[in-house]
């Protein structure tokens, strides 16, 4: 007997329905997963959603919960569309057990339930009472046991406990009985049957154990994104077979026959929407069951502006719950925390030790043809800095052979009349070319290493100037010190980039993992918004970054004696802001990218170009023009300059260079935070 020949049962009013889906469509790219799907869950019923793997059950549940947007159709859950302002779906009214475990492994059972209790606004007494009941009912180990150390079945039971915690009006359970022993499975079903008896709780449950769904009040059989049949299990079995499984198989066959007729339908005779293949049957209607009923007028939903504003505003309760969660997790992972605190300290130590210092023990060959020990050449050579330059006296041939073999970085040569010619050059105004040549120090450099060559040039000139009073007298510097080296230049920028990129990497990685493991989705379903997630993350990172910076500054200022002439609070504020900007950027990457490998690649891919172009290792003034404009727009260029001016010139916020560094950092931070929230919202 065909369903469309039967008079449809009277359609229940919207207030009597827990869920109503009409003509729901949803695709992933080109893959159409839900196609004109109708589903009706009356209040106080258990709805068993059955169907083969990949038919779209989880997708449908996510659409019902509002974590996935539908492309067409209409869904109402407990009287309003999901995610409607002021409606607690997602939120406290719905308990969701996802297919993946979606539990924090570092949490104990008690931490897990307390966390969800906080988000749902339960008092600690209520949470404790529910916890005691659930631990006993679900036969869980002691509530101090760590989730990560539980067996697969125990973890699923904890996950179910988290869904049941706040006594929600609607329970959505995606395969809760997988890996659960038959005794406990029966107990879970018995509990579900009991809680729906009150008429105030409704349950949607998916299961692969088709026969257990006989205990449901209504069963929906899905296939290929469509509802094949919907009705009481007995009705479905009576009309088809003795078991629900056989009934399902038979319905699949019927559907295949209809489908094959559809595929052989003449090309010219395309079916109008809602027209049957042979007998006028509407494809969106189930083969059996109530279906959508007569065309209903959709109610108009509107919310007061105050409710809308309240809906958008972040709730401190949720932010606090998320921060406590991060703190508990960090406490349980001391190794990772230690690494996070120590890594910047190690990086800056290595940088101060290895970058910017003068080369030491550089061997140079000296060919001195003057023999007298009182010659100018001897006294000049005695002024050469011995710690940097090691002199080896050789003959002309040996010196050049050694230099060509790479043993010496330079050859320094003095002619045999060097002293007398040099004296002539100093006394007489005009001298011959021979005198100039003989009275000069001849230096042949290996210029393959520019830093070493530049150092040698400087040391030789310095020795001459010490010996022969210089024409120039360099007064006390206006800013900085005579001893400042490359380390002094590079440190402020390096500190900013280390803080920034550490925050980017760690944020991107942990955020992506939380998303991938379904933890974030579970929090969303519990009523946590994207903005709350981002804000909580930024606040938690602020604590880590502050500790990192205190350690960094102690090391930099006290151990490596990097000078600081400016206000230490300004220095700290700018570095903290850069760390927070890095966190926000990490959030952007992880909101847009789904797996940790791609997120790490993105973070690494941006690291080097940014480091090079931001004027951190080499002055911006050396960057060619079109690139310099890009450099100035980057988050660390003005900030590094500002930090150098605070630390080395002692400037404050009254100087444009300093406040510009803060403004640019804040601007980037705001942009990244907004972008992360928008991407997270769009990708839900
Ligand atoms: N994020 C995604 N991107 C692209 N395709 C997806 C995504 N999630 C699911 N799909 C595809 O959508 C289809 C339906 O998946 P869904 O998880 O809803 O099925 P299901 O009925 O719940 O399966 P199972 O019983 O095995 O959990 C599958 O073909 C799946 O490959």
Image: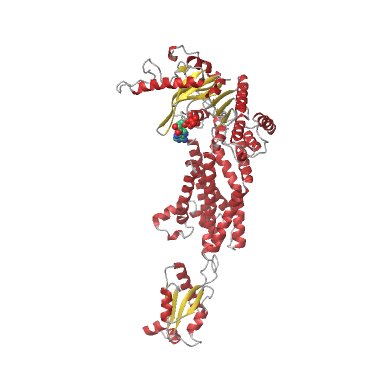
Residue in the foreground of this view, choosing between 182 and 675:
182
Tell me: residue 563, above or below residue 254.
below
Residue 211 location in percent, x, y?
A: 54, 22
How is the model colour-coded? secondary structure
Q: Is residue 436 left or right of residue 661?
A: left
Q: Residue furthest left?
A: 268
Residue 118 location in percent, x, y?
A: 64, 35
Quarter of the image with the N terminus is: top left
Residue in the foreground of this view, choosing between 103 and 559:
103
Write down the quadrant of residue 559 in the picture. Answer: bottom right
What residue sits 49% from the left and 57% below the top?
616
Would you say residue 484 is visible in this rendering?
A: yes
Give the total of numbered labels: 0
What residue sits 58% from the left and 41% below the top?
536
Would you say residue 468 is visible in this rendering?
A: no
Residue 552 location in percent, x, y?
A: 59, 56
Q: Is residue 387 left or right of residue 25?
A: right
What residue sits 62% from the left and 61% below the top?
558
Residue in the foreground of this view, choosing between 197 and 190:
190
Residue 84 location in percent, x, y?
A: 53, 28
Residue in the foreground of this view, choosing between 130 and 444:
130
Write down the quadrant of residue 439 in the picture. Answer: bottom left
Q: Is residue 203 left or right of residue 239?
A: right
């Amino acid at each position: 007997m065909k369903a469309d020949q039967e008079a449809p049962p009277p359609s229940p009013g919207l207030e009597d329905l827990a869920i109503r889906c009409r003509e729901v469509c949803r695709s992933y790219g080109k893959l159409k997963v839900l196609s004109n799907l109708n589903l009706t869950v009356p209040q106080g019923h258990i709805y068993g959603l059955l169907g083969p793997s990949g038919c779209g059950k989880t997708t449908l549940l996510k659409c019902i919960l509002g974590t996935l947007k539908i492309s067409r159709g209409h869904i109402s859950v407990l009287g309003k569309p999901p995610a409607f302002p002021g409606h607690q779906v997602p939120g406290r009214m719905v308990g969701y057990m996802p297919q993946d475990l979606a539990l924090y492994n570092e949490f104990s059972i008690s931490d897990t339930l307390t966390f969800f209790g906080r988000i749902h606004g339960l008092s600690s007494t209520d949470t404790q009472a529910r916890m005691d009941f659930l631990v006993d009912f679900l036969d869980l180990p002691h509530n101090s046991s760590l989730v990560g150390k539980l067996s697969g079945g125990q973890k699923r039971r904890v996950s179910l406990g988290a869904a049941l915690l706040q006594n929600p009006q609607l329970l959505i359970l995606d395969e809760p009985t997988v890996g659960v022993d038959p005794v406990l499975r029966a107990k879970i079903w018995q509990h579900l049957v009991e809680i729906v008896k009150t008429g105030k709780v409704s349950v949607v449950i998916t299961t692969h154990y088709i026969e257990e769904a006989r205990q449901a009040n209504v069963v929906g059989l899905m296939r290929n994104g469509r509802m094949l049949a919907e009705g009481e299990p007995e009705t479905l079995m009576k009309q088809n077979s003795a078991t629900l499984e056989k009934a399902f198989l038979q319905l699949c066959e019927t559907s295949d026959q209809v489908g094959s007729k559809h595929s052989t339908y003449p090309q010219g005779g395309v079916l109008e929407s809602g027209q049957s293949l042979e007998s006028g049957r509407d494809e969106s209607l189930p083969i059996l069951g109530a279906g959508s009923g007569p065309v209903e007028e959709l109610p108009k939903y509107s919310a007061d502006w105050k409710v809308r504003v309240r809906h958008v505003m972040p709730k401190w309760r949720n932010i606090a719950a998320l921060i406590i969660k991060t703190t508990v997790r960090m406490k349980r992972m001391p190794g990772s925390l230690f690494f996070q605190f120590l890594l910047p300290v190690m990086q800056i130590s290595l940088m101060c030790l290895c970058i910017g210092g003068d080369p030491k023990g550089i061997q140079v060959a000296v060919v001195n043809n003057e023999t007298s020990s009182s010659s100018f050449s001897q006294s000049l050579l005695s002024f050469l800095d011995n710690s940097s330059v090691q002199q080896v006296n050789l003959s002309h041939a040996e010196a050049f052979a050694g230099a060509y073999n790479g043993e010496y970085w330079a050859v320094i040569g003095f002619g045999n009349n060097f002293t007398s010619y040099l004296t002539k050059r100093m006394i007489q105004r005009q001298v011959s070319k021979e005198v100039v040549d003989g009275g000069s120090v001849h230096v042949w450099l290996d210029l393959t290493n520019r830093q070493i060559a530049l150092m040698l040039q400087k040391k030789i000139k310095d020795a001459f100037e010490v010996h022969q009073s210089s024409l120039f007298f360099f007064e006390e510097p206006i800013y900085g010190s005579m001893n400042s080296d490359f380390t002094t230049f590079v440190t402020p920028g390096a500190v900013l980039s280390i803080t920034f990129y550490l925050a980017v990497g760690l944020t991107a990685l942990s955020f992506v993992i939380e998303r991938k493991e379904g933890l974030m989705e579970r929090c969303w379903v519990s009523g946590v918004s994207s903005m709350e997630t981002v804000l909580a993350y930024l606040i938690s990172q602020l604590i880590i970054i502050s500790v990192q910076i205190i350690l960094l500054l102690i090391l930099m200022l006290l151990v490596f004696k990097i000078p600081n002439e400016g206000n230490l609070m300004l220095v700290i504020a700018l570095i903290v802001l850069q760390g927070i900007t890095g966190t926000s950027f990490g959030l952007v990457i992880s909101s847009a990218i789904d797996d940790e490998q791609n997120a790490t690649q993105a973070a690494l891919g941006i690291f080097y170009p940014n480091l090079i172009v931001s004027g951190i290792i080499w002055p911006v003034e050396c960057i060619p023009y079109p690139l310099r404009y890009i450099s100035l727009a980057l988050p660390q260029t003005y900030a590094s300059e500002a930090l150098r001016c605070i630390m080395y010139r002692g400037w404050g916020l009254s100087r444009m260079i300093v406040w510009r560094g803060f403004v640019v950092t804040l601007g980037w931070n705001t942009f990244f935070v907004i972008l992360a929230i928008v991407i997270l919202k769009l990708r839900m």
